[in-house]
Amino acid sequence: MRSAKEYLKLTESAVCHLFDGIDSYLNVLHEATSVVFVTSTPRGPAQDAEYGAWTVANAEKIATARTAEQEFIAESFALDTLCGAVLQIAVKAVEIYSVNRELPPEWAQVVNPRLAKFCIGRKVRTVPIGLIIYAARNQHTHFNDEQLREPNATVFARLATSHGYPSRELVADPAFDISNPYLTSYATNVMSLIQWKSYKQYLNDMQSLLA
């Protein structure tokens, strides 16, 4: 393939199918979160009574939502697999067609000069998205490795801590905390963070990265 434009065109149908698959799993999650108890009643006996009445009135919907929740949890790694495939296609494009050779000073200590091609794009939580997709692809592919290598480890450390949440102490976002025992792959979380929720959003970023 002679150009990034050609690469994106030839992979378009595959990536569109991947996003269709991703949406099919996320639709199950939406069913699980569609029933929410909302009240302005202060905590106490009155609220407890109100909640009890609500659960009775919405018993069928709640049961359906819980079933959907279990279905989504069971398929969460399948969802990560589809997201990982999108990241792989994106990383390969940057690997082949990025012409950047400059290392940002704040990454010079952890990024090998040969990986400077990934230090491109808009920043999310202080990290260029080129590096984010590179690290997320690597983590997904090597999820069974005991330790994440650099610059992947530093990328996730910054995603986990550069969130801007108000707190007296530094709190790691569990969605990107690499020590979180409940997550195997972070591919889905990363796709959500960088707002790759459709082919159009993916394409806009890829065209910008490879311009």
Image (tube, rainbow, N blue to C red):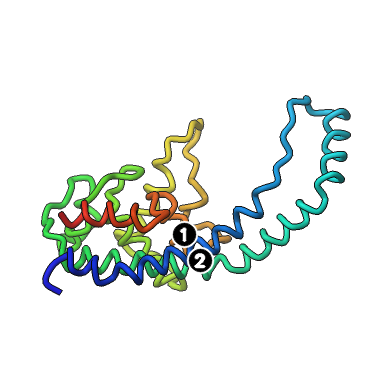
Amino acid identity at mark 2: Leu
Residue at 43% across / 48% down in the picture? 160
Vertical placement of residue 107 versus 41, above or below: below
State the separation of the CA atoms marked 2 and 1: 7 Å
According to the picture, the residue beneath numbered tag 1 turns out to be 188
Vertical placement of residue 141 versus 125, above or below: below
Residue at 65% across / 49% down in the picture? 33
Question: Residue 183's image quarter?
Answer: bottom right
Using residue 152 as the reference point, say whether residue 70 is left or right of it.
right
Q: Position of residue 211 (x, y in %)?
A: 15, 54
Q: Residues within 10 Å of mark 2 (few under 14, many from 20)?
A: many
State the mark number for residue 132: none
Question: Residue 45's image quarter?
Answer: top right
Mark 1 element type? helix
Residue at 33% across / 56% down in the picture? 202
Residue at 16% across / 61% down in the picture? 98
Q: Position of residue 180 (x, y in %)?
A: 53, 57
Vertical placement of residue 32 versus 38, above or below: below
Proximity of marks 2 and 1: CB atoms separated by less than 8 Å = yes
Work out whether residue 142 or residue 30 is closer to the camera in this orientation and state it: 30
Amino acid identity at mark 1: Thr
Which numbered disc, 2 or 1, marks the residue that appears first in the sequence?
Answer: 2
Using residue 155 as the reference point, say whether residue 92 is left or right of it.
left
State the mark number for residue 79: 2
Question: Residue 122's image quarter?
Answer: top left
Mark 2 element type? helix
Position of the N terminus, as image quadrant, is: bottom left
Q: Position of residue 120 (x, y in %)?
A: 21, 52
